[in-house]
Image (cartoon, rainbow, N blue to C red):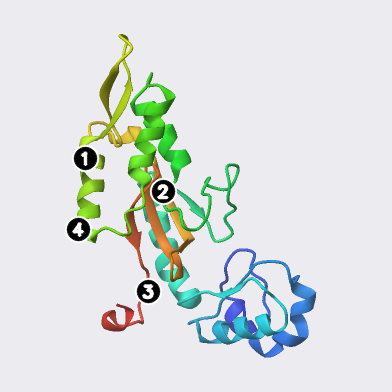
Amino acid sequence: DVRETAEYSPGRLPGAISVPRGFLELRIEDKAKREEPLIVYCAGGTRSAFAAKTLQELGYKDVVSMAGGYGELLLVEQPAIALLESLGWTHANLYAETFGTNGTEGRESEHQVVLTRRLRTTLEMLNPGMPEEAYVQAIEQLARDRSKQLAVNANHEVYDLIKDGVKVTVPDEHGGQTTETLRVIDWTKPSNNDYFLASQMWVAGDMYRRRCDLLAFVNGLPLVFIELKKPSVPLKGAF
């Protein structure tokens, strides 16, 4: 927290360390290690942007400035998270997410946007007794890279899979092959689905790397993207 002491005292993020911008170079070495990931914030985002640049110049490698500042987080993001939690969503901040099979959410990298660990668990629950290859085929179809397709065509494909289920080929009792349809979302009993809200999740493409304010996953599929802005930002400017 690089705001002034008078700003810090009335309210702050839980566990935040106060290092006013004017004293940053003098005090930071006593407060944080260079190998630690740091999130820097102020009231609106300007001071923290300059502070993050200074910290990088001082040798701190993993530093980001919190866009929008404390006002956006306190007035917009936290209430949004609290609202969705009250509706039954579980929440996790994935800013410092770890990757791999045993990682935070099982993602292989920032390029992966489907939470396959959650998806697999739900597929098995909604479609019990299927052979292993059935679940593997379903996940492959749902998580397939469609970035080269026209967006409208890709959306149609995923929409149909979510709505109607995923068709997979499995062995039958006669030694041949049969087609089964695996449900992806339980439309009849919503409580059977997994509702997960991720905040500050990093997503990378071929050209850009972005941190999403909120991503809402249903059964491991990212169905809702929420971009937040503090109330003082005009709608046109925010867009």
Tell me the amino acid under the disc marked 4.
Val
Front in this rendered view, residue 208 or 225: 208
The answer to the question of whether label 1 and label 2 lie on touching residues, with beta carbons closer than 8 A, is: no
Residue on which disc 1 sits = 163
Considering only order in the chain, which callout, 2 or 1, is on the residue closer to the N terminus? 2
Name the residue located 76 percent from the left edge and 70 percent from the top edge: 33
Q: Which residue is at the far right? A: 30
Q: Position of residue 167 (x, y in %)?
A: 26, 32
The answer to the question of whether label 4 and label 2 lie on touching residues, with beta carbons closer than 8 A, is: no
Determine the secondary structure under disc 3.
loop
Please identify the quadrant where the C terminus is shown. Answer: bottom left
The answer to the question of whether label 4 and label 1 lie on touching residues, with beta carbons closer than 8 A, is: no
Considering only order in the chain, which callout, 1 or 4, is on the residue closer to the N terminus? 4
Disc number for residue 152? 4
Residue on which disc 3 sits = 229
Considering only order in the chain, which callout, 2 or 3, is on the residue closer to the N terminus? 2
The answer to whether residue 122 is visible is: no
Instruction: Rate crowding at label 2 as few (under 14), some (14 to 19) or many (20 or more) other CA atoms within 10 Å.
Output: many
